[in-house]
Every structure is written in C-alpha cells, then in structure tokens.
Amino acid sequence: MRNSTTPTHTLNFPEQLECFEFCNSDFACNLVALASHKKIILGLINLPEESGCFDWKRVKDLYHESRCVSLCFAPETSMAVVPKSVIFCAAGSDFRLRVFRTDLQNSDTVQILNGHSNYINEVIWDCNSEFLASVGDDNTCRIWDTKSNFENTITFHLQSAGMSVKCHPEEPRKVVVAEKRGVIHLYNIQSEAAIISVEAQKSPLKSVDWCPLNRMCITALVAGDIISWDLRRPTPIDIKQVHEDGGQIVRIAPNAETVVASVGRPDVAVKVFTAKSRIPLVDATLKLYGGLSWHHRLPYIGVATDRKLCLWKLQIK
C-alpha cells in the first residue's frame, strides 16, 4: 500500500458531507459551502497565512430538500458589506436548481429553477453574474438568465450526458461544455452556437476545467487520464494516466496553471500534479468522496470525505 500524503489541516463534522465548494469571490474567499443530508452548511475557514492560526466557524445551516450534487457561489457574494451578502446555487438530485440568498442572519430566500428532466451533474455561475449554466443527464446545457429572474433562455442540446460546464473571466458569454462521450464544446451564448469542439477519442469523460490563467487551456478527466488541450489545436497537448480505474473530478489551481488536482479510483485517490512531473505533490487515499475545491487565493486544495474536510497546502512556485 502506497504512502498517503497527510492533510495539512482537517475539520471534523457530525454529519456526512456530500458536496463542498470554496467561494471564489475576492471578498469572501474564506467562505465555504458544504452539503450534508437535507442541509447546506455555510462556514468560514481562517488559514494561518491570513489570521495566524487555523480556525473554523460554522455560521449558517440552510435547508435543502434533496441530495446536493453541485454548488457554486455568485461572484457578487461578499463578507465585506453590511449586511453580508451570500448568494449561491445548489443542484439537487431531484433535477432542480436552488438559488439561495442570505445575509447569514435572519434574511434567507430560496428560488427553485425547474427545467432539467434528469440528474444535474454541474452548475456554475458566470464570472460576470449574467447567467447560471447547468449540465445534466438529460443531454442538455441550460443557460439561466439572471436579468430575467433566472429564466431558462437558452438550451444547448448534446449527444450524450452533459458532465461538466465552465466559464472564464476573459471570455464573457462563452461556456465550455463537456459531454460524457468525450467531446468538449466551446459555446458562444450570444450566437447560440459551438465555436470549437475537441475530442478525447475515449470515454467516459467525467469532468473538465478551464484554466483561469490561460483562456486557451482546458483540462479534462477522461477514463483515468488527465488530458489537456490548447483550444487553438484539435489534438491534446498532454495526456497523463493518473487513475487506473477511472476518474471523477479534475480542477486546475486558480493561481498556478500547471498544477492540477483530481480524484479517482482505485479507492478514493486524491492526486495533485504539476504539468511536467509524474511525481504527485499530493497522493492520498480517502474513505469517501464529497467534493474537491481550490482556495481562491492561497495554495490550498480541499476535499470533503465522509465526515471530514481535508486541506492540503501545496508548495507552488
């Protein structure tokens, strides 16, 4: 049995965690959302680099009717205003999206969005907060316009399940959509058409990410391989076999385009690699998987597992 990289910090919870996401807003980057049975937990993680010590504060529990499968925060979420403004979307196993708004005190609202006819695999908020985008097993990518009270204004019809969707701060009104059959599209929402499509030549594709520091770079987890493309070329620029029995999720570090984290099998294996190395920065085996997310500003990767949230600090140059 291989050695497992010990987490830098670990948080224990009384309930099993099903989903997890760091907030990617500059004004709330220590805010996290964790989903457990029938609830979304909002809390603050203080890290030693910012506060001098590691600390956790659970600030709000919100009722969520079904199992949560994906979480995303709105860009305007802020802990720096009075009252505080936290806006996020949760995708449920009942095929519904729920948009939550809370001031973390007494004002909480939830708006339910109906449209998907099968399981939703991912939901993301556009970087300019103009729309939500969601993909699911109903072979669709749906665009929900924030200006029209989250009306499902555009639907892209896919040839297989939509597994992952991403946006980019330098590419307004565009989304990258990954299909389970191994095809990835870059859609222009304005023209409602695909601009570019690339193929992995294998399947199943489980996850894709769009590099925040390089709008031409996308990385996908296909079967057990991490595959990267330059969108100016149809063929991959890098293929790395990482998970022998298949993968689940891949995420590029927000402040280091060559660092990629993934979760896959056998077991529940968490691995973090740099692009040009075959030796992982993190290689850990966990009990269960309940979400993976990078801290927006600091070099920490977090993974929810069973009743724990594990955080690893990366030495990234």
Image: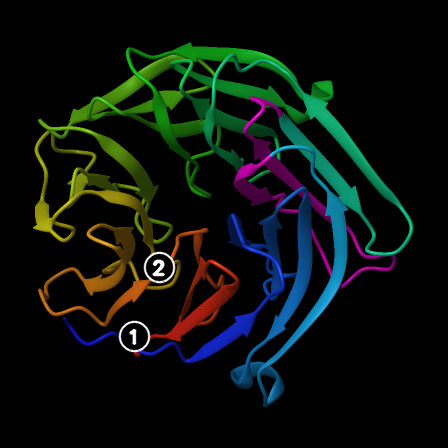
Residue 250 pos. (x, y %): 30, 48
> Mark number for residue 316?
1
Residue 118 in the image: above or below residue 5:
above
Q: Which residues are magenta?
A: 67-96
Q: Residues within 10 Å of mark 1 (few under 14, many from 20)?
A: some
Residue 208 pos. (x, y %): 31, 39
Taking the image as shown, residue 36 lies to the left or right of residue 312, namely: right
Residue at the (32%, 54%) spot, across then down: 252
Given residues 155 and 188, the one toward you in this image is: 155
Residue 63 pos. (x, y %): 75, 42
Residue at the (52%, 62%) spot, across then down: 307
Residue at the (25%, 74%) spot, across then down: 4
Disc 2 is placed on an element classified as loop
> Mark number for residue 253?
2
Amino acid under label 2? Ala
**Magenta stretch holds residue 140:** no
Residue farthest along the bottom direction in this orientation = 52
